Amino acid sequence: MFTGLVELMGTVSNIQKQDNTKSGGNGWTITVSNAAEILTDCHLGDSIAINGTCLTATEFDTDSFKVGVAPETLRCTNLGDLKVGDKVNLERAMDSNKRFGGHMVQGHVDNTVKIVEIKPEGNSIWYTLQMDQVDQDKMRYVIPKGFICLDGTSLTVCDVNDDKRTFSIMMIAHTQSHVIMTTKKIGDRVNVEVDMLAKYALKSLEDAIKNNQGIEALVKRVLNA
């Protein structure tokens, strides 16, 4: 579990599409350097989110760590687009001894969205992003003033246009300097994880309707719980 509060921007230092080392497991691996700040308490098998994607550390030293990336992860995220030298957002799994800012983020990316507009306003920046048509059903989880996680960054949805499959966020100056969004341009892909509480709420409602319980029965069940 994560919070969506990016701790550090690391640098991709190595990408192996067929890593035959013990820590590579004969699969796709990514090594991230300039990550010393988040490796002081690292252990093999720890979860570290890269651009909002929960991954497992299979090797590490004082400055860098390696993760394996499964084919399904490559299909659902922008990690396959990374190049050596790219900056990535990093966050360790949530520490129960710290304040819980941001929102509850699983690190399970739903899909990617495309940046279609970037518009400065004062010292803030508006970003408008669009869902692919194949992913348009996920727009039902995106609501104005609701939570959303973009490349691992917890943000607030400002506007939603279901017909165009777009939504917008506004990023303040502090956030701009601590995450990778400002390195992106129109047309770039961004990992998105919608609010998981919205998923649970909608599934409960859909199940109630499917089982002919209706809204009234669902409300009574909740009140009597």
Image (spheres, grey):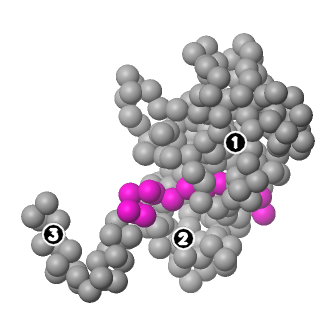
| Amino acid type, callout 2 | Lys
Answer whether residue 123 is visible to the viewer in this image: no
Farthest residue, direction bottom: 212
Q: What's the distance in space between the residues labelled 2 and 1, CA to CA?
A: 24 Å
Magenta region, residue range: 187-200
Sequence-wise first label, 3 or 1: 1
Answer whether residue 192 is magenta in the image: yes
Which residue is under mark 2?
A: 138
Q: Secondary structure at mark 2?
A: helix
Q: Could you say where residue 104 lies in the image, as x and y percent from the top left?
A: 43, 45
Which residue is under mark 3?
A: 221
| Amino acid type, callout 1 | Ile
Q: Could you say where residue 14 lies in the image, as x and y percent from the top left?
A: 87, 33
Depicted 109 relative to depicted 88: above or below: below
Residue 9 placement: quadrant: top right
Q: Secondary structure at mark 1?
A: helix
Residue 33 placement: quadrant: top right
Which residue is under mark 1?
A: 180
Q: Secondary structure at mark 3?
A: helix
Answer whether residue 55 is visible to the viewer in this image: yes
Badge nearest the viewer, 3 or 2:
3
Depicted 88 relative to depicted 109: above or below: above
Circle 2 crowding by C-alpha within 10 Å: few under 14, some 14–19, many from 20: some
Task: Left or right? Give the position of 108 relative to 61.
Answer: left
Sequence-wise first label, 2 or 1: 2
Badge nearest the viewer, 3 or 1:
3
Q: Could you say where residue 160 lies in the image, as x and y percent from the top left?
A: 51, 71
Task: Left or right? Give the position of 95 relative to 82.
Answer: left
* CB-based contact (under 8 Å), mark 3 and mark 2: no
Q: What's the distance in space between the residues labelled 3 and 1, CA to CA?
A: 44 Å
